[in-house]
Image (cartoon, grey):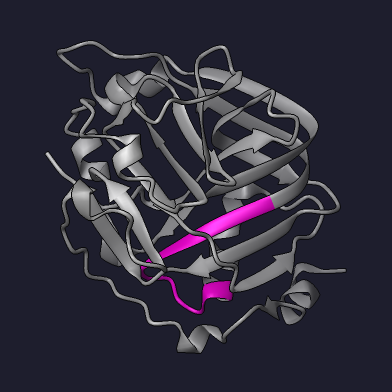
Amino acid sequence: MTQTSNRRRISLIATALAAVALTAGVPLASAADAPAPTGWVAQVGTFDYLVQPDYDGLAPLRSVVGDSTIGLGTFDRLDGELVMIGGTVYRVGTDGVPQRAALSRSTPWFEGVRFTPQASMRLDEGTECSSLAPLVDELAGTSQGMVAVRLIGTFSVLTARSVPAQSQPYPPLSEVVAEQTVFPLQDVAATLVGFRTGADLLGIGAPGLHLHGLTRARDAGGHILSCTTGPDVRLTIQRTRGVRVLATP
């Protein structure tokens, strides 16, 4: 079956996307106001803050995660990759092994949402992660705003990474990524979560589609560099109402 025929089988879940309000505004709020209202992304810091570079934590996780069920980010001093699945926060360090993270840990950048599926599609086997953004836009009915994304299934190829903690003076993010540890995985069941940031929110979120993930066995994961889907991967999205920044420098 072709990707085109799969698109025709897009299933709309709950209310139609046309009825979902999308707000491009980014209201500022204190961490004490968390959690973000339903349908809004709760965020700490901004992508622009990271690339200054500044990796100092801005808020403890317990003050910002609220009722989020999926999310991603990093920890103080860029100490590993943050992955939230099912409301549980994991840290993936340079050993590649996910560990539950204490909510007392601080974060310079976090994005989370109480994930409410609105539309989904079964992906053709062999679909590359690099080709997912147009499919997300099609499901969401827009290329703007922030769309929450979840993929569940078996991946024939899945490449993740993590980075080591940094010390001041902080090097540029490009230099940090050059020190990344890469974890090549094959034929693994996994859940990937993240956000597609539209052009209207560049600087707030990471540009394009940003994914973190964990294997079903919770024995590997991190920031997703690339993937190739197996025969059973389902892409599900939520077109969020906007972004609520709970802590800034």
Residue 220 lies, with reference to residue 143, above or below; the image says above
Give the position of the N terminus as an image quadrant: bottom right
| Occupied quadrant, residue 131 | bottom right
- What residue appears at the point 51 percent right and 14 percent down from the top-left corner? 94
**Residue situated in front as seen by the camera: 215 or 227:** 215
Residue 64: image x %, image y %? Answer: 31, 45
Residue 209 lies, with reference to residue 50, above or below; the image says below
Residue 16 lies, with reference to residue 34, above or below; the image says below
- What residue appears at the point 83 percent right and 54 percent down from the top-left corner? 232
How many numbered discs, if any? 0
Residue 154 lies, with reference to residue 120, above or below; the image says above
Residue 239: image x %, image y %? Answer: 47, 71
| Occupied quadrant, residue 102 | top left
**Residue situated in front as seen by the camera: 183 or 30:** 30
Residue 205: image x %, image y %? Answer: 32, 51
Give the position of the C terminus as an image quadrant: top left
Residue 43: image x %, image y %? Answer: 30, 50
The residues colored magenta run 139-151
- What residue appears at the point 53 percent right and 45 percent down from the top-left corner? 87
Is residue 107 located in the magenta-colored stretch of the structure? no
Residue farthest along the left direction in this orientation: 249
- What residue appears at the point 33 percent right and 23 percent down from the top-left corner? 78
